[in-house]
Image (cartoon, rainbow, N blue to C red):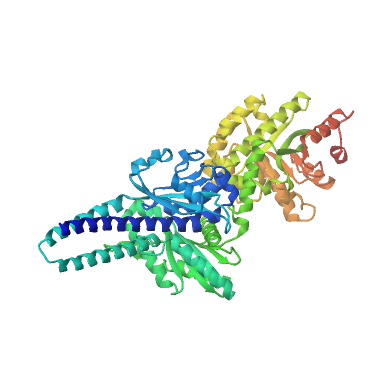
Amino acid sequence: MPIVGLGFFLARDLRQGIRAEAISDARLIAKLTARLRVQPLLEPSDLQRPLAPGDVNRLTRTLRSELGSDDVTRIKLWNRQGVIVYSDDLSIVGSRFEPSEELEEAFEGEVASEVSTLERAESARDRRFGDQVEVYVPLSFAEGTEPVGAFEIYVPYRSVAARIEDKTRHTFLLLMGGMAVLWATLFPIVAGASRRLRHQANENRHQALHDALTGLPNRTLFRDRAAHALVAARRDGRSVGVLIMDVDDFKDVNDTLGHHTGDLLLEEIGRRLVARSRTSDTVARLGGDEFAVLLPGLSDPEEARARALELRAALDEPFALGELRQVHAEASVGVAVYPAHGDDADALIQHADVAMYEAKRARTGAEVYDAERDRYSPDRLALVGELRRAIAHDDLVLHYQPKIDLSGPDRLVTGAEALVRWQHPTRGLLPPAEFIPQAEHTGLMRPLTIWVLETALRQSKAWRARGLDLDISVNLSTASLADTGLPDDVAAILERFDVPAERLTLEITESMAMSDPLRAGVLLGRLHDLGVGLAIDDFGTGHSSLSYLSRLPVRELKIDRSFVLKIEEDDTDAVIVRSTIDLGHNLGLRVVAEGAENDTVLQWLSARGCDAVQGYGITPPLPAAELTSWLERRRDAKRPPQGWRAVAA
């Protein structure tokens, strides 16, 4: 009986030990993730309501390695009102639930955890995962302040329970055999179990901080080492470099050669990067085909770019991946350096990631972070949010620049080009260059284009009601050429405002038409079938194929103002403009010159058969009300204007 009692005691101790280790490891993962991954991306005010889409995307990108692993089942962010403001389960975001005891402990500033069967309401969709270790970490943004919310993470408990059962079964088998031996034989058994527990705990800690495939440090350990390197750099006055490397076209390797070959390639890439790195550097795998390299103690920021090129060159030699299979791999590398590109680990990693995507987009191999090209910078993200509200609240305005017909003696106004502006509440009237690039990269181009079309055609209808029948021109962006729903939108808006399709002209630039000729041809063909006019804008600035342009269903060619402005002083530009007029007419197109600034230019263009002009010499772009007055003054004049001065009056 004493040995049986000892058996039950050992089994209980074994269960409690493994359970405690599992909970301890889960608490460690949760605290590191909350402190190093989540909290630096948020402000206290962010937890007052469900996170904005930009914050959700940024947080999801930051947590993608956790969300994509088998070590984490669910992640949530709570505010103090019991509302879930972020979760990888979108169905519960914004829902309010009665706080559990553990959540209340987190609100009081304590890290709380439990092994749960997920019986609470907010866990209804997660019960399929079985028992989970739930950990709640308080989120405080300043020392000594009350938490403003809590970070919750689920870690699977099935493997722990299985290990408990396995260890318990093994222990009882040993004890059943040990009933026939002396008490002295029990000591090695207990000592062996203790050693196994310590080994398992060490293994769990290693797995929490290292990548399972390559054995390299993972994102959490990389960030921790980056933070320590920054402390030393501030003390010594040196630089720290962060490189993010992404393997180009890695998906093709998996799809063509299989995931096993892809895994072998990642392992070999990790080995080569380590072999090319200094002992003080840290090479990590952040997840998927993305690696990171920490370069502490740099004396010169340029050294980081040089090291990036060296590490990229490590992939030049083909990889032999079993059975004499040779695989070639290339990578794109982004570089960020402390203090020029950020003063904390999160900023450097994020900025190196941005630079890496720029290197991949530009196919340059390696790029150093440039804030001007960072569409995810806080200022640009804020501007995107403001632009979304401006579109919804009708805070944009259109200015119109008239087109003057040169084919007749009266030089009539035959149309107007609609140009969007943003009346920003603090920055004043912004030109399109300040916000169109952000719209193109954030999915706002479609609602912005629809707003411009609706506003321009509404104005066209109002002008026709006053006896001013003008063609309307609207510029399309590169993103619009990828919008297969654009023709349907245009047709619906034309019908709503009762504007004949032939009175609308849509303008695309020469470079846009050539960026994706096949897609552009299909979309322009559908628009042409509606009866909408099409024009090539800024002609002469791209590298177009005349044979391709001749096949597009366009009716108008617009000469870029950069050539027109210099025809008086530059014979080359004069030849280009004259040749473009002839080319357009030979292709059966109407030719419009932009940038007509004075009498001499107007007369020169008229003498060479240019069909129409627009420019500041006639009038700059005007708000609708001012252009209406300008048009009515011209219409009500007793005789049509004959010269340039009359046109500009």
Where is residue 437 drawn, in percent x and y? 62, 48
Q: Residue furthest left?
A: 180
| 405 up-or-down from 381: above or below | above
Which residue shows up at 44% across the image and 55% down it? 30
Name the residue nearer the viewer: 453 or 36: 36
Name the residue nearer the viewer: 284 or 601: 284
Which quadrant: the C terminus?
A: top right
Where is residue 390 drawn, in percent x and y? 67, 40
Name the residue nearer the viewer: 371 or 63: 63
Where is residue 573 drawn, in percent x and y? 73, 53
Which residue shows up at 63% across the image and 29% down it? 493
Where is residue 348 drawn, in percent x and y? 54, 62
Residue 602 shows up from this direction: yes
| 307 up-or-down from 586: above or below | below
Residue 214 shows up from this direction: no
Which residue shows up at 38% across the image and 62% down it? 210
Q: Is residue 419 left or right of residue 604?
A: left
Which quadrant: the N terminus?
A: bottom left
Name the residue nearer the viewer: 426 or 365: 426
- When asked about the image quadrant of residue 494, the answer is top right
